[in-house]
Image (tube, coloured by chain):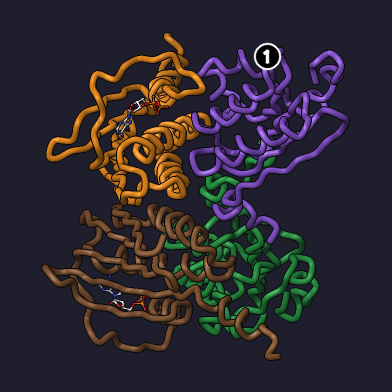
Chain colours: A purple, B green, C brown, D orange
Amino acid sequence: MRDLESSAIDVTDFRVEEDQPRAGVVVVSVHGDLDLYSADELGDRLVDAVERGAASLVVDLSGVAFVDSQGLGALLRGTRRLGAGEGRLRLVVPAPEIRRVFEITSLDQVFPMDDTREQALAHGTPENGLI
Amino acid sequence: MRDLESSAIDVTDFRVEEDQPRAGVVVVSVHGDLDLYSADELGDRLVDAVERGAASLVVDLSGVAFVDSQGLGALLRGTRRLGAGEGRLRLVVPAPEIRRVFEITSLDQVFPMDDTREQALAHGTPENGLI
Amino acid sequence: MNGEAVRLRFPARPEYLRLARLAVTGVGERMSFGRSDLADLKLAVTEACSNTVRHAYAPGAPGEIDLELRIEDDRLELVVEDRGVGIELPVREVEPSVEGGMGLSIIRAVVDELEINPRAEGAGTVVHMTKRTAARDGVQACAEPEV
Amino acid sequence: MNGEAVRLRFPARPEYLRLARLAVTGVGERMSFGRSDLADLKLAVTEACSNTVRHAYAPGAPGEIDLELRIEDDRLELVVEDRGVGIELPVREVEPSVEGGMGLSIIRAVVDELEINPRAEGAGTVVHMTKRTAARDGVQACAEPEV
Ligand SMILES: Nc1ncnc2c1ncn2[C@@H]1O[C@H](COP(=O)(O)OP(=O)(O)O)[C@@H](O)[C@H]1O
Ligand SMILES: Nc1ncnc2c1ncn2[C@@H]1O[C@H](COP(=O)(O)OP(=O)(O)O)[C@@H](O)[C@H]1O
């Protein structure tokens, strides 16, 4: 279907994928729109990852075309479950439109953000509590 | 914007591009939705190409996500302007959804169709009136 | 979602046809219609709305289209209504050609039911189309081994 | 398109928020809003509709959202209306937090005007938002050389 992929059909399916690039670090990739319809699913997955032993989370929003306050709430649930400690939940946010939502709400002060997953993973070791 | 390209925004701009791979043959590439809003523009372009000397037309619909009866009407205008002679207007239609519109209307009997532009251009020489 | 409805009212102008397609796609994918059925739904809605733009209202005279999408268990009902000049019934079956006549025959080919009526009150036309979701269930039932 | 309006009525349920975004995107791009303005419009409409889903109707009780998009020369007006419990006015300004309170402050940040009122007849809330297209014209005017 090549060129036709740019139809309205493709952003429907909300999907969360998990990956553990090293011990204690879980990368959660989100695909689709992050709103009231999907936010709980993401929040539950983040809490679940922490309960299964993740010390740091990278949430990759490269595949996300839309985030609203409910989506932000889901990310805040993840941070809160991780407990105190800065930079233990990092975001990958390449799109300026998505970044803007964090800036509007000053949550760019709460979530460290990178453009790529590689940058996010380069930020520390599990030992120092950072990713 | 990478992954975000699969939003509803991108199919808006209707666009027609022209290319002349060899004397007498004009390839018209269509991008966007082909309906009442855009059909006249395509029809005019096809008629115009013939009036400027095209003996054969290849209309490449690879970049088209939607075609309705008005779009079919525009293609029929092109064929009619070319005059009698089989196969002088060929279509490139890789998508089954678009192909189906031609089948429903039996216009697959009128327009020879190929999956790729290369196949369409391999079908003949300007001398024999075919592409 | 059963029994739910989405209603869209928009100007009867060519630039809004895409909006009608977006709406029907948004609803259709929630009902888990497959790719090919979604293409059929877009085609049916576009042809019906396009007819309203071209035939229902005098050129340049402002008119509106009401599109209603009614979600039922086994089907989507699509109702396109205008308050235009009205359609001559029964619709004459013509051989589709470059001169026209393709719209209704395309609709007939891609939906399961088509009904065209004058509006109950006042002038105008109501085009009522039905597309069933049942196909896939049928296939599944057949695939069940008959042990 | 000036003076034209698109009206969408849909169930107050989370799965329809995307449809509201599709509608506002479809209209917004016809008005040649840029990419970043379109993102703002989607955000504003989603927050307003999401509030209706979460606050206007009792959980499980069926309710509907009316979204009206009014196209004017220099702006798009977005009106989200429900027939729910109504909102307590004036809206208390709370520090946005994980407990909530982000919705309205996001809307305020991305539109040029926001007005919240009770419905004229009957219970419910009307959220009226305005987004101007004028920015680009302003820039052009400034670029004109003052010879
Ligand atoms: N909404 C409508 N209002 C008035 N007349 C209509 C409407 N829809 C269809 N018609 C009539 O039905 C005829 C057949 O329509 P159609 O099969 O789509 O072919 P075409 O539009 O190309 O003529 C039209 O020519 C028109 O006279
Ligand atoms: N459509 C509505 N109907 C009833 N109450 C509403 C509506 N929209 C907003 N509210 C009220 O306004 C408050 C503030 O909304 P908002 O800023 O979006 O934050 P939140 O929804 O997270 O509380 C809500 O808590 C709710 O009490």
Provide residue A89's location: percent of width, then percent of height.
70, 23
Horizontally, residue A25 falls left or right of residue A102, namely: right
Q: Nearer the viewer, residue A70 or D144?
A: A70
Q: Tell me the quadrant of the picture where the C terminus of chain C can be found.
A: bottom right
Label 1 is placed on what type of residue? Ala
Image height of B30 relative to D105, above or below: below
At 76% across and 60% down in the image, what residue appears?
Answer: B21
Provide residue B107's location: percent of width, then percent of height.
56, 81
Provide residue A9's location: percent of width, then percent of height.
57, 55
Q: Which residue is mark 1?
A: A84
Q: Tell me the quadrant of the picture where the N terminus of chain C can be found.
A: bottom left
Horizontally, residue C36 falls left or right of residue D41, namely: right
Horizontally, residue B121 falls left or right of residue C50, namely: right
Asked where in the image residue C105 lies, by quadrant, the reply is: bottom left
Asked where in the image residue A79 lies, by quadrant, the reply is: top right
Question: Under tag 1, what secondary structure?
Answer: loop
Image height of D33 relative to D61, above or below: above
Q: Nearer the viewer, residue B52 or A60?
A: A60
Q: Nearer the viewer, residue D40 or B61?
A: D40
At 24% across and 67% down in the image, what residue appears?
Answer: C56
Q: Nearer the viewer, residue B7 or C135?
A: C135
- The subunit carrying tag 1 is A
At 46% across and 72% down in the image, what residue appears?
Answer: B69
